[in-house]
Amino acid sequence: MTGRDLHWRLGGLALFAAAAGLVLVSNVDAVKSNAGLSAPLGLVAFLLYLAGAVLVIQGERLPRAWAARHLARPQRPAARPRVKSRVGGRTRP
């Protein structure tokens, strides 16, 4: 594992820890008062969990794969040239 890969994985771990902290804060806030913020905070925490888990698992490969996928342009197949037949003067596909 390279140092750069380790940095990406530690970044994923930091996102994972931030999500866990956000869940703890939202649970304490929900117990103290019924502010109704636990659902939006839970959704944000879930997204942070997902992003952190992907970075922990994939590491350095994820940004390269993302860039390769979004920078690559789909190429259209080249048109087939029409071949002229010498028999009968007609063209074939």
Image (tube, rainbow, N blue to C red):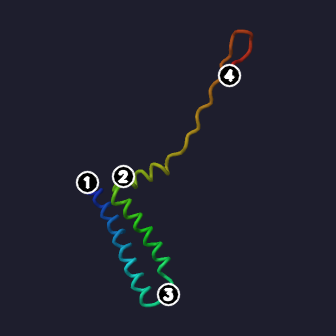
Marking on residue 93: 4
Q: What amino acid is at disc 2?
A: Arg
- On screen, 86 above or below 10? above
**Which residue lies under the disc numbered 2?**
61
- On screen, 23 above or below 61? below
Mark 4: give few (<14), some (14-19) or many (20+) Cα within 10 Å. few
x and y percentages locating residue 69 in the rendered image:
47, 49
Q: What amino acid is at disc 3?
A: Ala
Q: Dot 2 lies on which element? A: helix
Q: Dot 3 lies on which element? A: loop
Q: What amino acid is at disc 4?
A: Pro
Q: What amino acid is at disc 1?
A: Thr
x and y percentages locating residue 31 in the rendered image:
42, 87
Image-quadrant location for residue 14: bottom left
In this image, 55 relative to 39: left or right? left
Q: Nearer the viewer, residue 81 or 34?
A: 34
Image-quadrant location for residue 16: bottom left
Q: CA distance from mark 4 to mark 2?
A: 45 Å
Q: CA distance from mark 3 to mark 2?
A: 40 Å
**Which residue lies under the disc numbered 3?**
35
| Quarter in which the C terminus is drawn | top right
- On screen, 49 above or below 26? above
Which of disc 2 and disc 4 is earlier in sequence? 2
Q: CA distance from mark 3 to mark 4?
A: 71 Å
Name the mark nearer the viewer: 1 or 3. 3
Contact check, label 4 and label 2, Cβ < 8 Å = no
**Which residue lies under the disc numbered 1?**
2
Which of disc 3 and disc 1 is earlier in sequence? 1
Q: Dot 4 lies on which element? A: loop
Question: Residue at (45%, 75%) from the top-left corner?
Answer: 42
